[in-house]
Image (cartoon, rainbow, N blue to C red):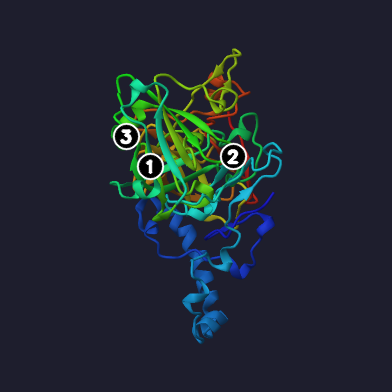
Amino acid sequence: MTGLPTQPGHLRPAPENFLSAEQIGEVKAGRRDFLRSSLLAATAALVAPLTARAAAGSGDPDILKLPEWSTSSGRPVVERPYGSPSKYESQLVRRDLPGVLSKVPGNSVSFTPLQGLFGIITPSGLHYERHHQGWQDIDPARHRLMITASNPAFIKQAKVYTMDDLLRLPSVSRIHFLECGGNGASEWGAATFPTVQYTHGMLSCSEFTGVPLRLLLEDCGVDYKKARYVLAEGADGATLTRTIAMEMIESGEVLVAYGQNGEMLRPENGYPLRLIVPGAQGVSWVKWLRRIEVGDQPFASREETLSYVDLLPDGMHRQYTTINECKSVITSPSGGQTLLSQGFFNVTGLAWSGRGKIKQVDVSFDGGRNWKPARLDSAVLSKALTRFNIDWVWDGRPAILQSRAIDETGYVQPSYKQLRAVRGSQSTYHNNAIQSWEVLASGEVNNVQVL
């Protein structure tokens, strides 16, 4: 199992990517939180060690002597025609998990390093991937999108659009999260994987740019009274297909997208065209989109009957479970990290809901006995990741960190006990139970489950 990238402040990554003492960043003194009256006691305990360390650092050679980068010319732009991260951040990468899927060529997944990201936007190069038969780099000049119908009465005219046709149409840009329905599947029975990259890393959030699917359907003369579903089909070897309910499209949210984070989609994210279905599980966001078929009932495709279904306690299957329910996770401190000393920490994480905006996130430091409201410090957008933060002073004793999200519909993220009471323990998809991170007296952080 691979480790974690560089972490700020008093956090140490997993042993596999252990950093030298020189690389571990110092906590910045004077932050505004120290001035809050609610933290006066914590401030007294924290200021002393910070002051002592600052004084000890006055003889630091990196302060007394200018380093080589301050006394030499920089490198020319042509050496990096397309920007890439610093070599010191080389451990912050997507990671796969060999053996987690079948041996079918290209049937693979890579996980986003949530523990090392800031804000709510996932860099395109760190966006998680899930492929049923590998990715393709398709020639946009040859790519086509066809809109047709299972019954001629559903649309007035079937049409074929080129990429040039689509790029000439009015576009919109929106920020949304994308989560695989199988995110957290390994945790249904027990705490399995050590890090948040593997427990929750099939999750990303981007700004997508494209054309509302509603506009294209209306261009074809769709009859909304008769046509209540569409089938989206991809151009990859898996020919992945998914049913999308028309009410989601009528809202204008569903996009036929060609842009991600200000540039064209990356090949592994569906270049040159993919479907954006806000709030829906990732398999509905069909990549390399080539065909939309309009119909009057669900299409019962392979990925809706043989896969992406849940076995319930009574032996029945949940089918067409499209929406990702309200969920959250603390990303730092999180499993695989180590708290290097007692004192102040900014606990941070992400919350999201496929039904709208996040209304509130509560955090517990004692395994759910007591809860405190966290700050929602970034933009709170509908069906997008929301960043939360909360102050914590660790006294060196064992602790269990949890987060619990509530969305604008009033839905409250469940505990494992509550979730299993309804869904059992043999499920695979849509695990949105509360995640627990155990902090040992040594500072080591582990993945545990609290019922």
What whole-number distance in Å separates the C-alpha atoms at marks 1 and 3?
14 Å
Q: Are marks 2 and 3 in contact (CB under 8 Å)?
A: no
Question: In what element is the residue under mark 3?
Answer: helix
Check disc 1 and report the residue beneath it.
161
Which is nearer the N-term, disc 1 or disc 2?
A: 1
Report x, y in % for residue 411.
40, 28
Depth check, front residue: 28 or 356: 356
- Disc tally is 3
Residue beneath the point at 53% across and 25% down:
301
Check disc 3 and report the residue beneath it.
214
Check disc 2 and report the residue beneath it.
237
- Residue 156 seen in the figure: yes
- Label 1 is placed on what type of residue? Tyr
Report x, y in % for residue 349.
47, 46
Report x, y in % for residue 28.
46, 65
- Label 3 is placed on what type of residue? Arg
Depth check, front residue: 180 or 438: 180
Front label number (1 vs 2)? 1
Which is nearer the N-term, disc 2 or disc 3?
A: 3
Quadrant hosting residue 193: top right
Front label number (1 vs 3)? 1
Q: In the figure, is residue 138 to the left or right of 147?
A: right
- Label 2 is placed on what type of residue? Gly
What whole-number distance in Å separates the C-alpha atoms at marks 2 and 3?
27 Å
Q: Is residue 441 above or below residue 249?
A: below
Depth check, front residue: 38 or 58: 58
Which is nearer the N-term, disc 1 or disc 3?
A: 1
Residue beneath the point at 68% across and 39% down:
100
